[in-house]
Image (spheres, rainbow, N blue to C red):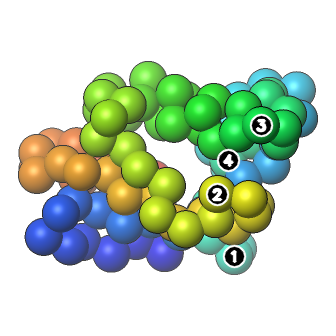
Amino acid sequence: MLKQTADGILITLKISPNASKNEIIKTDDGVKIKITAPPVDGKANKALIEFLSKEFKISKTSIEILRGETSKDKTILFKTTDNGKIEILKKIF
């Protein structure tokens, strides 16, 4: 699910830690992101933010996990008003 707000773009997704490689997968239920980091001590969350930052060229400080710190289901806020980046996010999510 993707929702545009005054702060940026809200995205709901599933994360799969301990994967063989970092990747974004579209499924019938939405978007799933595979992360190689283990779900221990916030390592998977940190790796998720780093992966999304590199993938969409958005600074790590502009990506925030709003819900799901300890869950596989996460709500992510991309704090951006850049229309180019917003369009890219809309195409993927």
Q: Which is more N-terminal, label 3 or label 1?
A: 1
* Local secondary structure at mark 1: loop
> Residue 45 location, x and y as percent?
64, 42
- Circle nearer the N terminus (3, 4): 4
In the image, taking residue 24 as reference, residue 52 lies left or right, namely: left
Q: Amino acid at mark 3?
A: Asp
Q: Which residue is mark 2?
A: 69
Residue at label 1?
Answer: 29
* Neighbourhood count class around disc 4 (C-alpha, 10 Å): few under 14, some 14–19, many 20 upward: many
Point out which mark residue 91 bears. none
Residue 40: percent from left, percent from top: 84, 38
> Pointer 4: what residue?
33
* 31 relative to 16, above or below: below
Query: Can residue 26 be spotted in the picture?
Result: no
Residue 26 falls in image quadrant? bottom right
Which label lies toward us, 2 or 4? 2
Mark 1 in CB contact with mark 2 (< 8 angstroms): no
Q: Amino acid at mark 1?
A: Asp
Residue type at mark 2? Glu
Q: Are marks 2 and 4 in contact (CB under 8 Å)?
A: no
> Residue drawn at (37%, 58%), measured in percent from left and top?
77
Distance from disc 1 to disc 4, alpha carbons, whole Å, reads 12 Å
Indicate which label's residue lies in the foreground, 1 or 2: 2
Asked which secondary structure carries label 3, the reply is: loop
* Separation (CA) of disc 2 from disc 3: 10 Å
**Residue drawn at 63 percent across, 30 percent down:** 47
Name the secondary structure under disc 2: loop
Q: Is residue 54 above or below residue 24?
A: above
Crowding around mark 1 (Cα neighbors within 10 Å: few <14, some 14 to 19, many 20+) is few
